[in-house]
Amino acid sequence: TDGPTPGYTTLLAEATIEPGVSVARHTHPGVESAYVMEGGFELPIQGQATRTIKKGDGFQIPPETPHAGGKPGDAKTVILITYVVEKGKPLASPA
């Protein structure tokens, strides 16, 4: 959907990360806010200490901040993610 301001769009996604899979280091052109619905994994965010997130945790990643999936979990992880990004830019880019 459009918003919250002109030139930006809001996207809502559910992502499933299978056991033993790690997410490559990447960035987004806007804020990423997420909530862990199931499972968990290590979350390294540039400029912050790596932390382990688990079911019930929320986190936010600033625009253009490199981050990755870290050490994969032993069980499937499901996260609900909201992105607020500039229109016309790719949702994610390798970092």
Image (spheres, rainbow, N blue to C red):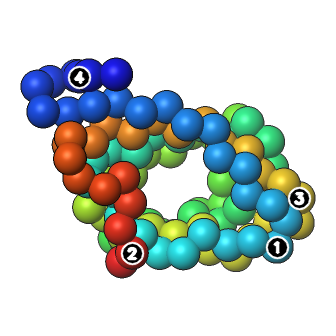
Of the residues shown, which amino acid type is indicated by label 1?
A: Gly
Q: Position of residue 32 (x, y in %)?
A: 40, 45
Residue 75 is marked as 3
Of the residues shown, which amino acid type is indicated by label 4?
A: Gly
Asked if residue 54 shows in the view, the reply is no
**Which of the two discs, 3 and 4, sits closer to the camera?**
4
Q: Residue beneath label 1, please?
A: 20
* Inter-mark Cα distance, 1 to 4: 36 Å
Of the residues shown, which amino acid type is indicated by label 2?
A: Pro
Q: Residue beneath label 4, please?
A: 3
* Inter-mark Cα distance, 2 to 3: 25 Å
Q: Residues within 10 Å of mark 3 (few under 14, many from 20)?
A: some
Residue found farthest to the left: 6
* Inter-mark Cα distance, 1 to 2: 20 Å
Please tell me which residue is depicted at 42% across the width and 33% down the height of the picture: 11
Residue 94 is marked as 2
Please tell me which residue is depicted at 73% across the width and 36% down the height of the picture: 37
Asked if residue 73 shows in the view, the reply is yes
> Could you say which quadrant of the image residue 84 lies in?
top left
Q: Is residue 55 left or right of residue 69?
A: right
**Which of the two discs, 2 and 3, sits closer to the camera?**
2
Mark 2 touches mark 4? (CB < 8 Å): no
Q: Name the secondary structure under disc 3.
A: loop
> Could you say which quadrant of the image residue 31 lies in?
top left
As drawn, 58 above or below 5? below
Q: Residues within 10 Å of mark 1 (few under 14, many from 20)?
A: few
The answer to which of 64 and 11 lies nearer the viewer is: 11
